[in-house]
Image (cartoon, helix red, strand yellow):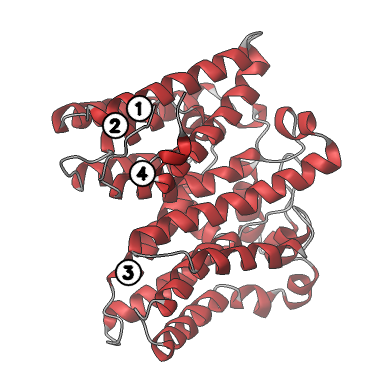
Amino acid sequence: MIDFWKMKNFKQITAYALILVINLMFTVKYLSRFLDGGVYLGFFVLGVQIAAIVYFNKNLFGRKIVNYFSILFSLFIIGLVVISHYYIKLESINVDRWSVISSFLIELFKGNYPYYAISHLGNYPGPMPVYFAIALPFYEMGELSVLSSIGYILFVFILYKEYRGGSKNGIVVFLLATSLYVYWEIATRSNIFSYSLFFLLGLRLFLSIKRDKYDMRFFLSAILTGLLLSTRNVFVLAYIVFFFSAMKRGEIKFKTLFIYGLVSTFAFLFTFFPFIIFFKEDFFILNPFIIQSSFLIPSGYIFVFILTSIVLSFLVQNDLDKYFYSGISLFASIAIYFIYHAISLGFNEVLFDNGADISYFLLSIPFLFYYIKENGKNFKLVI
């Protein structure tokens, strides 16, 4: 029997466990819709992934194997994008992220207030302005699955460029390649992983700035921080972990962080100015803050999420921990959202039907994978 409490790297095990649980939810939910034994197949995939983690923890993939596997995985994703474009019709998809984007942009181009737009499933557009600005080129291209795939391909490219001996890159690529949510996102034109990765890269830039030097990199990083926050407000939880821990550990002075936050806030608010100027009355009737804080979960829970992130920030011991606890914070917030709806509607309704959107768990995936990637030390299982 494996004694989990004697593992040398509990945080790494936790990261693996959450990643596996997220994929298990996807496999159980969606495979059971098409196969009688879908639930069992989901647990079989889980077993394969656990076996791979245990085995390749001691027998690491060589760099050539990782590179070849990464190329094949990327090519497969590109192939799936092509298949999605020609064979998976948008109207047949019971996921409306593509429709939220298209309806928002259609109304905007007509000169109408875009937050009144309704998706093909009857939902208002919850994301913030920069979310749609990033999606615009892919919408004009005519295939939003390109946006879905770019995050995974970009992450694999990062693994390739930043390969180190003894790294976990091979395990990360294997877990991605055997995870149903990757292919689900591309087929449904979802984009959660991509946006979360963009956000993570913005936080990497924050860690690279010279903390008490107000140079161009400092202000560009601050502006980018504000712009990226104007995609989904849930990302503020990761900011809390990064900023509070940096200040607590004396990595950045309060004055410097205040200036950084001020610039970021102005950049964030600037993205809403066009809507306030041209649609002032409409904006205060319905806007992404109202939609995201009221339609998904009661607004009172937001304080719980923020408090959780603040507490987690005090557990940070190094830069790598910031990614881990950001992932934990994002996962915890979605878990609370999931449990809230499970209590209200029932577990089966939430997991197997449409009582809650389990794809929001993908917000945490890039942070957890990045932690595993950067944590090069092997852990040993005590059997």
For marks 4 and 1, give the CA distance. 14 Å
The kind of secondary structure element at disc 4 is loop
Question: Which residue is tagged 2?
Answer: 57
At horizontal 32% and vertical 67% (from top left) the residue drawn is 205
Query: Which mark, residue 207?
Result: 3
Question: Residue 321 location in percent, x, y?
Answer: 39, 59
Question: Residue 154 location in percent, x, y?
Answer: 32, 45
Position of residue 230 relative to residue 5, above or below, is below
Q: Name the amino acid, label 1.
A: Val
Q: Quadrant of residue 168?
A: top left
Question: Residue 184 location in percent, x, y?
Answer: 53, 30
The kind of secondary structure element at disc 3 is helix
For marks 2 and 1, give the CA distance. 5 Å
Q: Name the amino acid, label 3.
A: Leu
At horizontal 77% and vertical 47% (from top left) the residue drawn is 340
Position of residue 323 relative to residue 81, above or below, is below
The kind of secondary structure element at disc 2 is helix
Binning the other alpha carbons within 10 Å of mark 4 as few (below 14), some (14 to 19) or many (20 upward) gives: some
